[in-house]
Image (tube, grey):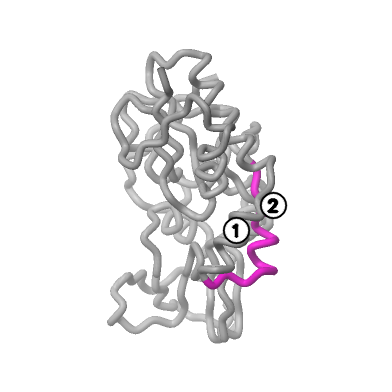
Amino acid sequence: MSVHLFVQETLLTHPVVVAASSELGDGIDLINRFEHGCFALVETGFLPQLTGYKVDAGCGISLRDAGLARFYSPVRPDQLDDPVVRLQTASLTTELLARATLPGFFGFTPGAWVTNADQPYDAIVLDEIAGISPTESEFADDLSRAWFVLTGTPFVSHIVAVPEGASADNREAVTNLIHAGFEGDLSRTKAFAIEQGADPTLIDAVLADVASVLTGDERLAIPELFRRCGLNTGFGSVDWAT
């Protein structure tokens, strides 16, 4: 019987999808919709919604010095005064990262956060391919690196949700697949990103930095992200699967 695994499709989970489509994925059945009771590799921002799940304490996706979420502005960030910041993202986790990082790292509190493309803005947060594509913006700052400098902990972008009652063997099969995805050849993910418009230097930096092993630092970072974001997300605590 195969193990059902839902992988939220983002650029950072692409290596896992590649691994699952190879012989490494034998016994793992990737499903394209989240179903309660399956294993799941999802963005950290979804953690408060994962009723009936624990978070794997040793596996996830984290970044320190290079990531996909970047802050762009036409002037130096320290010259911005109550700026309107546009969040051009579909990711709740990117929004949490931006809200948790910008005030503390750059020293300003945004006058407003906007998401509508018709609203004027002074600076912008982009992620995924847009975050690592060539730009004419005068100033660009990597928010994963900013988070690491600000907190001393890595930014955990994705977590592994373990359903209650899952067997140790099934959990090991899932985490082994995820680790294998990042320990193997990442050339297919790089090629995919470049085809979509990513800057080769920037995607190289991300793939050189990304990690799939969670340690104590990463485990501290997850509640810290929810604490610093300033939003009522419904987060209480992390129920770790150890």
- Measured as percent of width and height from the top left, residue 101 is found at 53, 59
Residue 16's place in the image compared with 93, above or below, is above
Task: Say whether residue 108 is left or right of residue 67.
Answer: left
The residue type indicated by label 2 comes to: Asp
Task: Say whether residue 233 is left or right of residue 203.
Answer: left
- Residue shown at 60%/28% (left/top)? 176
- Measured as percent of width and height from the top left, residue 13 is found at 51, 47
Label 2, on which residue?
Answer: 209
- The answer to whether the residues at label 1 and label 2 have Cβ atoms under 8 Å apart is yes
Prevailing SS of the magenta stretch: helix
**Which is more toward the observer, 144 or 101?**
144
- Residue shown at 51%/55% (left/top)? 11
Residue 38's place in the image compared with 134, above or below, is above
Q: Which residues are magenta?
A: 197-211
- Residue shown at 54%/68% (left/top)? 195
Quadrant including the N terminus: top left
Residue 43's place in the image compared with 238, above or below, is below
**How far apart are the alpha carbons under marks 1 and 2?**
8 Å
